[in-house]
Image: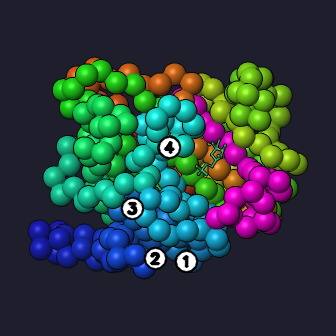
């Protein structure tokens, strides 16, 4: 393809607009009509639509689109911690910061760009951040939309020759589901998990798929790199492929917790489920100059799918 044609195609596939707060957001499109939207507020994916224009990520009708408060939905980037504790806000500061578009990112694998529309975002620590988290890092985030509609996020965190530091991380992924009572997760059977509803006590999952009848807030440990979320009513399955992210967070607030969140509708727990590729149990430690990469790829396939039918080679 001519260089100019390639550039114009790339430009058509990537558009920069402003949200209601005047903050830049990047819209990625593929030739089939699928799209994804990434806000520079938090580097947060706020929308992922299939070629029919159906929204695949959940965003609360009561979400607050105002900087410093993360939007309730999409895929918030939780860094440098997942959870509460210490001097940082819950789930860390990255999702509350303004990122910038990086026109000259460090090179990735060829397959990471081939045939995809993508954007690279960059977060560097600010003077303010250094007060709470005194480490020199660079966080490069690539969000890409493939021609088959798959959404991929690649996070690279580098210790910019400062002191060694450790962090935990999660892609806090709000999936849109038709009815939580008709949803099951395959791929986490028999794993150990930390139960956030029981002071992070460790339990072992039973041998069958996970279904939902009450609040669930768990971190599954050493989970497989392929997890399937089956939405029976919509006859579709989300396939979550991950790399560099050994843990998986599963969260549905159910009735009582839903009522306690101002930016979440009382009944909205029925239409969402968080399944997050994460590294929480064993934080990542980076010495000066070292880099960590965490990848997640989200696909949607017809619901006849079971996780053990997946060809892992597609991913690696
Ligand atoms: O495990 C998921 C979790 O930590 C829940 O405890 C709940 O707090 C959820 O994240 C929502 O977090 P957020 O900061 O997005 O409100």
Give the number of the mark in front: 2 or 3.
Answer: 3
Task: Name which of mark 2 and mark 1 comes first in the sequence.
Answer: 2
Marks 2 and 4 in Cβ contact (< 8 Å): no
What residue appears at the point 42 percent right and 54 percent down from the top-left corner?
A: 96
Q: Check disc 3: other Cα within 10 Å, few if <14, some if 14-19, many if 20+.
A: many
Q: Check disc 1: other Cα within 10 Å, few if <14, some if 14-19, many if 20+.
A: few
Marks 2 and 1 in Cβ contact (< 8 Å): yes
Region rendered in magenta: 246-269
Task: Name which of mark 3 and mark 1 comes first in the sequence.
Answer: 3
Q: CA distance from mark 2 to mark 1?
A: 7 Å
Marks 4 and 3 in Cβ contact (< 8 Å): no
Q: Residue furthest right?
A: 213
Residue 41 tag number: 3
Vertical placement of 133 versus 305: above or below? above
Residue 53 tag number: 1
Judged from the image, the secondary structure of the residue bearing numbered disc 4 is: loop
Read off the residue under disc 2.
Answer: 33
Judged from the image, the secondary structure of the residue bearing numbered disc 1 is: loop
Read off the residue under disc 4.
Answer: 89
């Amino acid at each position: 393809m001519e260089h100019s044609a390639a550039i114009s195609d790339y430009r058509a596939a990537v558009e920069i607009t402003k949200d209601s707060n005047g903050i830049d957001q990047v819209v990625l499109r593929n030739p089939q009509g699928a799209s994804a939207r990434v806000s520079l507020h938090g580097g947060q994916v706020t929308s992922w639509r299939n070629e029919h224009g159906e929204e695949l990520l959940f965003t609360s009708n009561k979400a607050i689109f105002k900087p410093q408060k993360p939007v309730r939905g999409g895929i918030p980037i939780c860094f440098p911690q997942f959870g509460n504790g210490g001097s940082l806000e819950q789930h860390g500061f990255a999702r509350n910061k303004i990122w910038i578009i990086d026109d000259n990112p460090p090179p990735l694998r060829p397959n990471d760009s081939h045939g995809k529309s993508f954007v690279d975002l960059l977060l560097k620590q600010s003077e303010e951040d250094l007060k709470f988290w005194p480490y020199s890092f660079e966080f490069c985030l690539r969000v890409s939309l493939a021609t088959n509609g798959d959404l991929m996020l690649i996070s690279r965190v580098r210790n910019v020759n400062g002191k060694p530091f450790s962090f935990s991380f999660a892609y806090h992924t709000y999936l849109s589901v038709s009815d939580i009572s008709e949803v099951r997760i395959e791929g986490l059977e028999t794993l150990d998990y930390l139960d956030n509803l029981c002071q992070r006590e460790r339990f072992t999952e039973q041998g069958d798929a996970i279904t939902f009848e009450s609040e669930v807030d768990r971190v599954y440990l050493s989970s497989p790199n392929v997890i399937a979320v089956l939405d029976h009513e919509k006859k579709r399955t989300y396939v979550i492929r991950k790399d560099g992210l050994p843990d998986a967070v599963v969260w549905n607030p159910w009735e009582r917790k839903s009522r306690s969140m101002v930016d979440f509708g009382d009944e909205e727990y029925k239409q969402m489920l968080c399944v997050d590729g994460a590294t929480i149990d064993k934080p990542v430690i980076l010495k000066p100059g070292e880099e960590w990469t965490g990848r997640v790829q989200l696909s949607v396939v017809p619901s006849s799918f079971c996780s053990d039918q997946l060809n892992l080679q597609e991913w690696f």
